[in-house]
Amino acid sequence: LFLYFPLAVIVLFSFNADTVNSFPIQHFSLKWYSVLFRDDELLQSVGTSISIALISTAVALLIGIPAAYAMHKYDFKGKKLIDKIVLMPITLPGIVTGVAMLSFFPFVGVKISLTAVTFGHITFLCAIVVTQMLARFKRLDPYLEQAAYDLGATPSATFFKVILPNIKTAIIGCVLLCLVLSMDEIPVTFFLIAGNNTLPLEIYAMMRRGITPEVNAISTLIFIFSTTAILLSMRLNKEK
């Protein structure tokens, strides 16, 4: 009740026809959703967040799935150390990661921009993908791979035609989780962005000028999207 009642209040206020949020609500309306979809700056920030989330998630999957498969299948020197290193981006405070990247990226020639933000998101999303997929690989029947080899399949054919189809639900769930986390990211984005804001930073800027029902409307939409994606992710990751 303590955690979720405030969310319910935000959803309720998003339908308030008045500018001032107060109980009891005199009139209900979709007015602020209409205002929201006419706000060019807010819509631009949504587009920026979606673009970064899609690119970051795609790259994280391309890196994270093979990395998780290798860590599951092979024993090699330094494996335990790599396990700990992979978890660092999600265990360290976001502000520490953001400051570190702010110092490092210009040093290697990456300007503070949306490109830097994308690299920053890829860093912690890779950790999410590796941990999620590694857990799924551990639940995968090892005899499937052996059977494929017995039938003459090459290692690459086994991976793409046997392994991936059997973990597709986990991949979809991982994609949904990564999209939610990327769309919601603030600390790393705050230190690396220049110019266009992402959605969380745009909402933060709006709230500094005073909370308006428009903020309640966009918060409600984010809440619905995030909740749906996380529930789907949890359900898909439980499937065998």
Image: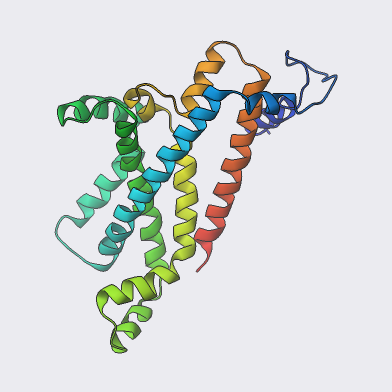
Which quadrant of the structure image shows residue 51? top left
Which residue is drawn at the image coordinates 67% and 23% (left, top)?
35
Which quadrant of the structure image shows residue 190? top left
Q: Is residue 93 left or right of residue 9?
A: left
The N terminus, quarter of image: top right
Which residue is drawn at the image coordinates 28% and 87% (left, top)?
152
Q: Is residue 218 above or below residue 207?
A: below
Of 1 and 7, the residue lying toward us:
7
Of 102 and 2, the residue lying toward us:
102
x, y percent for residue 122: 33, 42
x, y percent for residue 171: 44, 59
Residue 184 shows up from this direction:
no
Which residue is drawn at the image coordinates 20% and 57% (left, top)?
79
Residue 82 shows up from this direction:
yes
Furthest-right residue in view? 26
Q: Is residue 198 above or below residue 158?
A: above
x, y percent for residue 222: 59, 35
x, y percent for residue 20: 73, 13
Which residue is drawn at the image coordinates 61% and 30% (left, top)?
219
Q: Is residue 2 left or right of residue 142?
A: right
Q: Is residue 91 above or below residue 214?
A: below
